Amino acid sequence: MASSGSLHDGYVPGRHLIDAYGNGGFRFAEMSHRGSILVLPSGVRAWDVAEAKAIDRNALRPVVTEAGAVELLLIGTGVDIAPFPDALRRWLKDTGIGLDVMQTGAAARTYNILMAENRKVAAALIAVS
């Protein structure tokens, strides 16, 4: 993390809009972060996922942990929309979380709109160049 703030231990508490994306990272909460992020109701955390095929139950466990506060998960799979395994879709659905998979830019913009409407939304965003 660089700029005027930092991800303390890979985490910034609170709900934050995504101010910018690209160049391998994101800007939010007056900070910049290089790499992928999970944007949850509890805060923004570094996410150790660089490509869509690396998304599995373990990668999404922090989202499921907050299932009561998340009704919709937006997954940004990078520059291209990537297929998402049916087993993971069912697993999320069983925890009460809806899913929408799209390009990272679209996911970040959609997250901002839904968060501004005070919706129960989370985003898993793979960094793009």
Image (cartoon, helix red, strand yellow):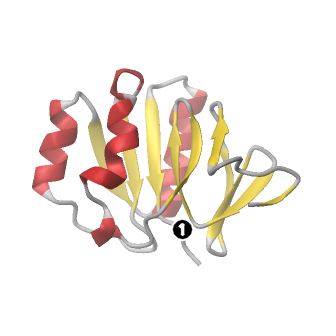
The residue positioned 23% from the left and 27% from the top of the image is 96
Quarter of the figure with residue 68: top left
The residue positioned 77% from the left and 51% from the top of the image is 6
- The residue where tag 1 is placed is 127
Name the spot of residue 119 as percent of width and height, x first: 47, 25
Q: Is 47 situated above or below 110?
A: below
Quarter of the figure with residue 112: top right
Mark 1 crowd level (few <14, some 14–19, many ≥20, 10 Å Cα):
many
Kind of residue sitting beneath label 1: Ala
The answer, for residue 96, to whether it is visible in the render is: yes
The answer, for residue 73, to whether it is visible in the render is: no
* The N terminus: image quadrant: bottom right
Residue farthest along the right direction in this orientation: 4
What element does badge 1 sit on?
loop
Of the pair 28 and 19, the residue shown nearer to us: 28
Left or right, 73 with respect to 14, comes to left
Q: Is 111 situated above or below 65?
A: below
